[in-house]
Amino acid sequence: MELLSNLALGFGVALSPFTLFLAVVGCFLGTIIGALPGLGPSNGVAILIPLAFSLGLDATSALVLMTSVYYGAMYGGRISSILLNIPGDEPALMTTLDGYPMAKAGRAGDALVLSGFASFFGALFATIGLMLLAPVLSRIAYQFGPAEYFALYLLAFSTLGGIASNNQAKAALASCIGLGIAMIGLDNQTGMPRLTGGNLHLMDGIDFLVAIVGLFAVAEVFIFIESHGKGSSIGVKLEKVTLPVRDLVRGIGTMIRCSTIGFIAGVLPGAGASLGSFLAYVGEKKWRGGDRSGFGKGDPQGVIAPEAGNNSAAGGALVPMLTLGVPGSGTTAVLLALLMTLNITPGPTLFTDRPEVVWGLIASLLIANFVLLAMNVPLVKIFVKILTVPPWVLLPGVMMVSFVGIFSLTGSYFDLLLMIVFGIIGWLFRKLDIPTVPIILGILLGKHMEDALRRAMILSDGDWTYLFSSGISIGLWAFAILGFVAPFFLRHIIKKPQAITD
Amino acid sequence: MKSDRLFGVVIIFGALAYAAGALQIQTSFMSDPVGSKTFPLILAGVAALCGLVMILKPDTDPDWPNARTFGSLIVSVAVMIAYAYTIKPLGFMIPTAVCAAILSYQISPRPVPAVLTGIGLSIGLFLVFKYALGLGLQPFPKSWF
Amino acid sequence: MKTKLRALALGATLSLVGSATLAAECIAPANPGGGWDFTCRQIGKILHDIGQVDNPVQVTNMAGGGGGLAFSHVVNERSDDSDLIVAASQATATRLAQNAYAGMTADQVRFVGAIGADPGVIVVAADSPFQTLGDMVDAVKADPGSVAFAGGSAAGGFDHLKVLMVLKDAGFTDITKVKYIGVDGGADAITQTIGGFTQGMTGDMSEIVGFLQSGEVRALAVLTEERVPGFEDVPTAKEQGFDVVAVNWRGLYVPKDISDEDFETWGAKLQAVADSDEWKEAMAANGLAPFTKVGGDFQSWVDGVIADTVELSKEIGVLQ
């Protein structure tokens, strides 16, 4: 019953005309961002944060807008995967495997409609899961003291570095760089400046938004300059859009299985949507008989599986982000940055302190889902048109938006230069196959992680065994080590597609 | 192979510099058992270890761009830095048009579309920022009025 | 150093280009959303609504150095600007006392007044063995290691000092032995206390309202002169025998070199805001208790607070 009254509160917030308007705008923008090659949920949300902030929206509205963009981008990512064989974002990578062959076989419309429904199902599944699971998790969070939080942060970094990357050393290095950057600025415990080199700009530390926009958006501009925008606008024509009822009915089982897998992958701190779509696709392929199935040759189920998986994972990733303050993916890390900018500290207390924020968000996610289904099935042709924007117009635009966004937020030349530096680092790391998401996560969580450690030591008078003194912390340490080490053995069994970074 | 090894060396030196910086941190009287230096030092240690792994077990080299593309990248960085410094004194319109045009040219080297992109983005984005988002941007240098 | 500051300050005012000529300006030394931002926006709005100023007050956010950037901006560049007010709070006083503004001191500006305050509280979990503030103090005296406190400010910050002031008043001198962890805000501090990781929480009244109502915590004492309206069942520290008053006041300072006349005018305007119904509503909605001190009265009170903080900070070693 509590759930219903909470939902009523949420819909009370979300059904105001203005919030609804924001949800529709967010979904629309998000779908465009997802569909455009080179822009995905992470960098799309990143460049919009400073702008959303300058609109002067209150916390709930800003959150509704940005999560609509987030969900929208997850939907939109499939459009360029299917029509151009270029994933609009990382999680849509798996959708190209069967989506593009279907489009080549003249079934582009079917593929778009099926994947639209699969996205809807996955996202709905995850939103309901979030609704049921998040309050329970937030109650458990009272059991989390400094030692437990430290272990939890460690788990987030190690799963991100283990399961979701190709090379542990590089992922761990990226985490260290992010954590190291977070150390710059005033020390929370003593109030003394650290590693600032006496530079006043660095006293408050490096703004995570500067790093995010630099690493995600500016780096993307460099990538496109390097490739001279090649191979971006050759695609398959979209003819008629009809409803392939038979495939849809056959796909219900697929959707349920893949949404479940995706949701679990999303809830794991640090794992995220790319892993969700990957596991969903591989799992469904096994279920349907491995190589003997039609997967990889344009099987409609091969389009449904990853889309249900990645949208479900996207929702699942909100669970640890809201309840524990530990993001489950690159994009939720960006959303966490948004919350922190709005002075909302996610964590167990969020549900009791700011119920209108949480339930308003959940209600608007439900609404956003229906809006997105309407936009992405009957109106999909509009978004297909947007794919014709050439990169030599799009990328300079992205850059200008990044600059103005950061400048209007911080008003500092220093931050703009810093953003360019992060852009260069982002490009270099992409070349060297070093993931950049751990850097963001490190900057966001660095101080928290260090503080957790120091608080634990204050409480225990410097006794390090305190870190392993509760069942929860031992469990988290075990999973953290397992998550980091297991891929060494699994890598030979499951061969992964290249460069999953989300 | 070479890239990873080189980068590993850079990382180890970076980590050493970071550790040296961490050792310089002023501590106050009132200190907790961990203190201000421990965590940064642990990070430097782990990073150095990762650098070492990259030296010992490098991945295959990425495809580095050729000299001309590198040139484009350097030009783009220079343009961005210039943009950062000019947007305030010169207003939004002119630096945006120029920088967007140059960047566009770097992606696709055709002068006419590049110039059109620059002018279009400059006007279009200004309208969006000013009227849709309500940012107080200044279109032209202040001295023009 | 100074030129960098200037560049930064210029940048921060980018969004105001060409508009701030006639209107008064209020600098909030933090990003939008926090307490200082609230002070500027509410006072600015009410000043205009009740006709104390003709044009809406322009709010500028100048985050940096925990308020230090705005402070140095005012001291170095705007020291005679009579149209400028700056949001301040107890945090401003604490930081000035602890020399956190790079050598700048409280006498480089003039404090106009405070018109509201968030009362300090000391809280325990509902199932805590401590029934009164006295119980808690006795436990600390017996074994300082057995009682850990959590608060929303860093070690040495105002929340930390509240506990120390109470203990000092009780005659406990070994205050460096008191266990305190600074967490991210009052809500976190309460969670840690409910979870049993710390035995007491020190913070502001506004931070604990929700938890008090849900019955998860008990307030042992509120650090005000008298019981706070709306929370009459929470005893003050004073009536339990500990003469400690610690409130997080919200107020304003102005540049030092403005005329006495201008200073008085701002004082009168601020008094008008304090007396308005709009401000009373804003206080009630944000968990603030009435606390009005304006003019010379306030200046000497701030000086006293700073002197006390300096003394205490030296004892715990935050200040050398």
Image (tube, helix red, strand yellow):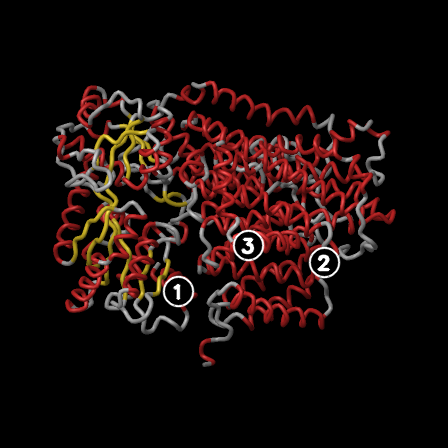
In this rendering, position of residue A101 left or right of residue B67: right
User: Residue placed at 29% from the left, 45% from the top?
Assistant: C287
Q: Which mark is residue A22?
A: 3
Residue that numbered label 2 is attached to: A382
Q: Chain of mark 2?
A: A
Q: Are marks 1 and 3 in contact (CB under 8 Å)?
A: no
Quadrant where the N terminus of chain C lies? bottom left
Identified by mark 3, the residue type is Leu
User: Helix, strand, or loop for circle 1?
Assistant: loop
In this rendering, position of residue A147 left or right of residue A334: left
Residue C68 placement (x, y as % from top left) = 31, 53
User: Residue placed at 63% from the left, 72% from the top?
Assistant: B119
Kindly report which numbered mark, 1 or 3, lies closer to the viewer in this rendering: 3
Quadrant where the C terminus of chain C lies? top left
Residue C171 placement (x, y as % from top left) = 12, 28
Residue that numbered label 1 is attached to: C13
Identified by mark 1, the residue type is Thr
Nearest the eye: A135 or C63: A135
Question: Is there one chain holding both mark 1 and mark 3?
Answer: no
Q: CA distance from mark 3 to mark 2?
A: 20 Å
Identified by mark 2, the residue type is Ile
User: Residue placed at 51% from the left, 39% from the top?
Assistant: A7
